[in-house]
Amino acid sequence: MIEGIKSGEADRDQDEFVSIDELHEYASQKVREVQPAMKPEIYAIREGFKIRLTKVAPGDPRQRYRKEVARFIHRGEISFVGRRTLDVLMTRLGLETTEAKAVEDEVLEPYRNEFRDKLQQYQQVFTELLERDETITDSDRLDLQNLQQILGLRNEDTMPIEAQVTARFKTHQQNLQTYQQAFTTTLRQEFPLSAASRDRLRQTQQQLELADRDIAAIESQITAEVEAYHQKLQDYQRLFFTATQQEYPLSKAIWNDLRQQQQRLGLTDVDVAPIQAQITTQIESYHQKLQQYEQAFVKATQRQHYPDEVTWKQLHQTWQTLGLSDGDVGAIERRINAKIKTHQANLRQYEQDFTEGVQQEYPLSTFKRSQLTQRHQALNLNDEDVSAIENPIIAAIAEHRQKLQQYEQVFRESMQFEYPLSDATREELQRFQRILELNDADVSAIEAIIIQPSLEAEYRKQQERIRQQQQAEKQQEEAVRLNQQETERQRQQEEAEYRQKLQQMDITAIETRVVASQELIKPPIQQSSSAQPTQPAQEQITRQKFLKWAGLGGVGLVTAVLGHEIFKGQSPTPKSTIIEPANQPTNQPTNKPTTISVPEPKYIPFKFETVTVDKKGQIIKREPNKQAKFFNEDLGNGITLDMVQIVEGSFNMGSPPDENGRAKNEEPQHVVNVPAFFIGKFEVTQEQYQQIMGSTPSKFKGAKRPVEQVSWNDSVEFCKKLSQKAGREYCLPSEAEWEYACRAGTTTPFHFGETITTELANYDGDSTYASAPKGKNRQETTEVGSFSPNAFGLYDMHGNIWEWCQDTWHDSYKGAPSDGSAWIDNDNKIRMLRGGSWYDVPGKCRSASRNLNFSVGRNLIHSNLGFRVVVSAVGRTP
């Protein structure tokens, strides 16, 4: 009643007063809304005048609107007609929509709460009934209708509730089934459950919105079933595993027996499939590991040789890593070792057959080669096996034949020079025999062929030729003497030329030193020079000869040479010789110092590309931007000699013990410190040799091909003439200089890497080194620079032609110098060769490979011997 008075809702007639009868009507309506059966009345006065209790506050449109809202409330909401009426009233009262909405919500709130409570009561009863019986019976439906009437709800109020609860109940049942299925599947796959599986099931429970009480019964029932199921699976797993241990793959009889056991246990094919797959996979995986070990064993041995100690350790580690049993590994190794034993026996048999074949005839005939081919095919040997056997034997035969030929040539040459042979020559021949490792039988056979009765006649003819040659030399000397006058005319011109070339030497200082040297050794000077006998022309130290020596070197060389000439020219009664300029009296000193020098050459940078190969000869690295410097030595007629700068450094000379193809004479390895020098970019070519020497002895003609068939003495003579022409002292490289220049900072067998191919060098391509393939056998020289250079910019350091060095032969490096100088024994006529040639197998072309030959004798020189030159200082002659 207070609410009706305060809100003005009790003012039914809208006269702005609340009377007793209006308040009674308002209160009665509220009571009946709560309890429809009650009928409140006023018994004191049924009819009469209105008793006004209070007046509605005037001027508040919201209160007026509040009363109208209360009139149109029906079941907690505003009726359809009331909604339209209130919209008109809101406009008439000038209320904003938000204000009207706030009033409506405030008035409707208690009605709505009451209506919601009734709906919740009905929903709770319906939910509990459905959870208990899962279905609604006719009796339950009557009870629900009675509850609906009591709560004052209509069918349209309860039907959404029942539909929602029913749908939620079905969803809950489906979620329970889903969880039951997930739990069952997980438990079948893994029993007992791991923590990870339990966490996944917990996530599934939360996603399905299931409580612990919902899933407890499910898990308990399924766990008991799965325990029994897993026990059956374990029984079947033991049966299947035992069967596979007895035989694998399984026979049809074993499969039938396992099928019966499966049916007895009540397991389906789906149940046993994972067990079968797991065990089968384990067996196949183990077999794959066995195959893997077998492949590793085969790779290590190639079924051809037993593994070494290091390989055994690696195989043992592989065996342990794979987890293989001793028995299985032993079976594999016994099987492969038997094949290795057979293969090695076949190799030995073929080696014996081939050795016997080449002993019977060499080279092999087509028929014999066909027999050997059939033999190696019958022994199941491949071409690589055959090559590995034949190549060393053929190389040994070729090397032995070459040594026999070398000895024969040396013996013939010795016989031509003297017969009968002196003890010294015989000792030298025996030493050469030991170097060539020839037995007495081989040597005796050679000597028996050469020593024939006709040899004496040939020897006499040779002596006559020598006499004639000596006579010709005397005639030539006479011609030289006759040409001295012409030479005298050219002295002034030569002096002028040398003055232009040499501008750094003080002639006066040198002459003073020479005069002082002569003063120390000559007797007291005679008062009159005219009384002294005149010295022969060739012993006088003339101005022209002095300038010539000065042009070939510096102060030290000039002084040394002059000193030598002075002492050489002394007679028992020493004579005085004073060096004066040409066309001046001999007793008049030179007042003006003269500077003599050789112009510094112009250094030219050049770029080139180097390559590196692996053991198979495949290029694994290219360096296209390598650089070096060189200078051109002008030989005349447009022909030049390129000399490349080699910086000083140190390296290990010789070969390591494990290098393929090495020889005993390449040890011990030792460190050598090499000063800077210049070396020919290419081997000396035929056009260069022709320009200096006037002719070329080469067999394979070509201006750009290397000169060959030159002896060591020929090479030294070339260097001497080149030095005279250039004003720089050229010579052959020492062995240390040659190997240092060849290696160019590398330590591998070749500067190209682990091997070479005929695409990189010119050698006997029918033979191979390391794992490189066979290539071309050109059987002749190639033009210089046809292949890639090394890191110093030098070409053809491997193959093409053997290159002479200064050193004499030593059978090892014990006692060798470590400063890069040549190791020379003056009593030894055998000189060193390096680099290999077109005729040789690749192992002979290694950086460390050494060869030898006599320094003299045209008959000893082959078409694979040549040279390249070096110069130690380019500004002067040392």
Image: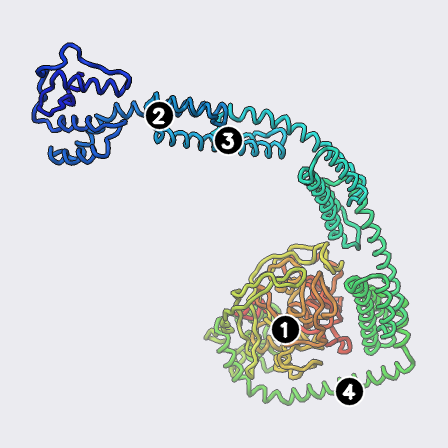
Q: Quadrant of residue 251?
A: top right
Question: Is the residue marked by circle 1 packed among few (<14), some (14-19), or many (20+) residues within 10 Å?
Answer: many
Q: Name which residue type carries label 3.
A: Gln
Kind of element beneath mark 3: helix
Report the side of 637 relative to 714 (left or right).
Answer: left
Q: CA distance from mark 1 to mark 4?
A: 36 Å
- Position above or below: 649 against 184: below
Quarter the C terminus occupies: bottom right
Q: Earlier in the sequence, mark 3 or mark 2?
A: 2
- Is residue 598 visible in the rendered image? The answer is yes
Kind of element beneath mark 2: helix
Residue drawn at point x = 54 percent, y = 24 percent: 216
Instruction: Name the residue that disc number 1 marks.
Output: 683
- Position above or below: 486 against 599: below
Q: CA distance from mark 1 to mark 2?
A: 114 Å
Question: Is the residue marked by circle 2 packed among few (<14), some (14-19), or many (20+) residues within 10 Å?
Answer: some
* In this rendering, the label closer to the viewer, 3 or 2: 2
Instruction: Name the residue that disc number 3 marks.
Output: 173
Q: Are marks 1 and 4 in contact (CB under 8 Å)?
A: no
Residue drawn at point x = 77 percent, y = 87 percent: 468
* In this rendering, the label closer to the viewer, 1 or 4: 1
Q: Earlier in the sequence, mark 1 or mark 4?
A: 4
Q: Name which residue type carries label 4.
A: Gln
* In this rendering, the label closer to the viewer, 3 or 4: 3
Q: Name which residue type carries label 2.
A: Leu
Rendering coords of residue 660 (x, y %)? 73, 59
Q: Quadrant of residue 758?
A: bottom right
* In this rendering, the label closer to the viewer, 1 or 2: 2
Q: CA distance from mark 3 to mark 2?
A: 24 Å
Instruction: Name the residue that disc number 2 marks.
Output: 119
Report the side of 83 relative to 556 (left or right).
Answer: left
